[in-house]
Image (cartoon, grey):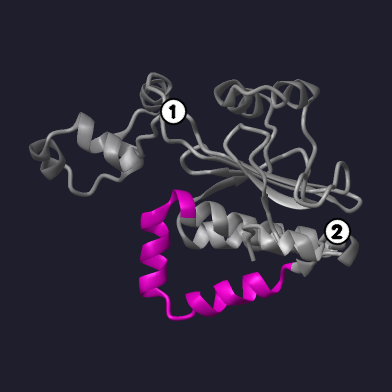
Amino acid sequence: MNRGKFIASINDSVSLLTKLDLFKSKGTKGNGVYSEEFLKTSKGDNIVATYECAIQNFDYDILLKDDSLIQFQQKNDDLRYAYIQNPYKFISKEEYVLLTHSTEELELFPDLTIEELINENEYEQFLNEQNLNSISNYFRYDCSPAGYNPLVHSYSHFHIGMNENIRIPTSKKITPLKFTKFCIKNTYYENWKSCFESDPTFISEIIKIKNECLELPQTKWSEIEKNELYLL
């Protein structure tokens, strides 16, 4: 995957997230540029520490509305993508308004927007006080020749959770957009379902996204690996 297609796929990811009302902002450092502190912390098994380090150091390429983050890194032919769901329970502004205002109060001010009903500082403090979300997701995709060994360490694979030994092989190189789609479908079910049911072009877009994934080199995807459970 050349650099141009890689960046274009990230931009398409932003478009998809925006379409599903999940996008918040893009990172400011440039794709794949992360702090030394994050690189060190992420080698551990503490997802909360990893997430907090990434947020504090702006070590993300896309930030979602629920403050979950996505990273996309390309170094020569090596690829690394990661999705870290906000490990704390997230309450949207709409939900917060319903928690802090009675129905009667809201009926008195029908013309006020959500932003006008909320004190930003109080809302941020409220989010900071939320408990951990015990079912938050962590997905990572790696594609690298380092350590490749058929049936032992696949060239292209997904990690689900922090256990480094969980590697689900893929038969193709995954694009940033395909990875984003995987994260959305498996984390934001209601957004995904709503778009699937309301947009007649959605299925054709999904097919196109899959077809954009690249075949692996024959030297990195052996016949024996096809006997294992794999994606694509």
Give the magenta part as a residue range: 186-213
- The amino acid marked with disc number 1 is Tyr
* Residue 109: mark: none
Asked whether the viewer can see residue 90, the reply is yes
**At 46% from the left edge and 48% from the top edge, which residue is drawn?**
187
| Relative image position of residue 159 (x, y in whole percent) | 64, 43
| Relative image position of residue 160 (x, y in whole percent) | 58, 42
| Relative image position of residue 51 (x, y in whole percent) | 59, 28
Residue 121, relative to residue 197: is it above or below? Answer: above
Query: Residue 114: which quarter of the image?
Result: top left
Of residues 230 and 132, the one nearer the viewer is 230
Asked whether the viewer can see residue 11, the reply is no
**At 80% from the left edge and 37% from the top edge, which residue is drawn?**
33
Report the Cα–Cα distance between label 2 and label 1: 38 Å
193 left or right of 82 in image:
left
Q: Do residues under tags 2 and 1 come within 8 Å of each other at their CB atoms?
A: no
8 left or right of 109 in image:
right
| Quadrant where the C terminus is found in the figure | bottom right
Q: Which residue is mark 2?
A: 220
